[in-house]
Amino acid sequence: MKHDKPTSQSSQSSTRQQSGSPREPQPNQSPPAATQMGEGSYEGTRDYDEGLKSYLETADVKADAEAAKPASPQEAVELKKAEQEGLSHSKAPGQ
């Protein structure tokens, strides 16, 4: 039984597609308006709210807050410095 080998042209074509460079630009396809609104979704918001509520009901929030504190004064300074660096890139007024 004879097996056909791919030609160099078809090999290049598949390589091009695998590299993420399509031959023609694809139009942006947005989900239907009924399932997505703005940058969020009702389902995502609902999942977040349920997760947050569950966490607040079952977790030891005070212990989690205590565990999140800096372990040393040096770490506190480093965290504050990192926070200021992040805020320096913010476009929000007053930050």
Image (cartoon, helix red, strand yellow):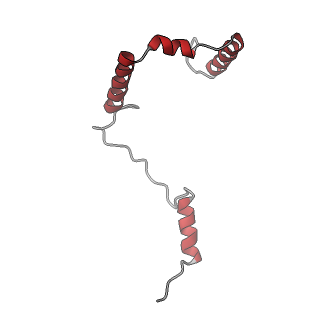
Q: Residue at x 70, y 13 (%)?
A: 77
Between residues 72 and 26, which one lies in front from this camera angle? 72
Q: Quadrant of residue 51?
A: top left
| 69 relative position to 2: left or right | right
Q: Residue at x 51, y 13 (%)?
A: 65
Say above or below: 76 vs 1. Answer: above
Between residues 53 and 42, which one lies in front from this camera angle? 53
- Outermost right residue: 74
Q: Residue at x 68, y 16 (%)?
A: 75
Q: Quadrant of residue 56?
A: top left
Say above or below: 78 vs 26. Answer: above
Where's residue 87, x and y in %? Answer: 62, 18
Where's residue 74, x and y in %? Answer: 72, 13
Image quarter hosting the C terminus: top right
- Outermost bottom residue: 1
Where's residue 53, x and y in %? Answer: 35, 19
Query: Looking at the image, how many numbered discs can be counted on the residues?
Result: 0
Between residues 87 and 48, which one lies in front from this camera angle? 48
- Outermost left residue: 34
Where's residue 20, x and y in %? Answer: 54, 56
Q: Residue at x 46, y 89 (%)?
A: 1
Q: Quadrant of residue 66?
A: top right
| 75 relative position to 64: left or right | right
Between residues 8 and 83, which one lies in front from this camera angle? 83
| 88 relative position to 40: left or right | right
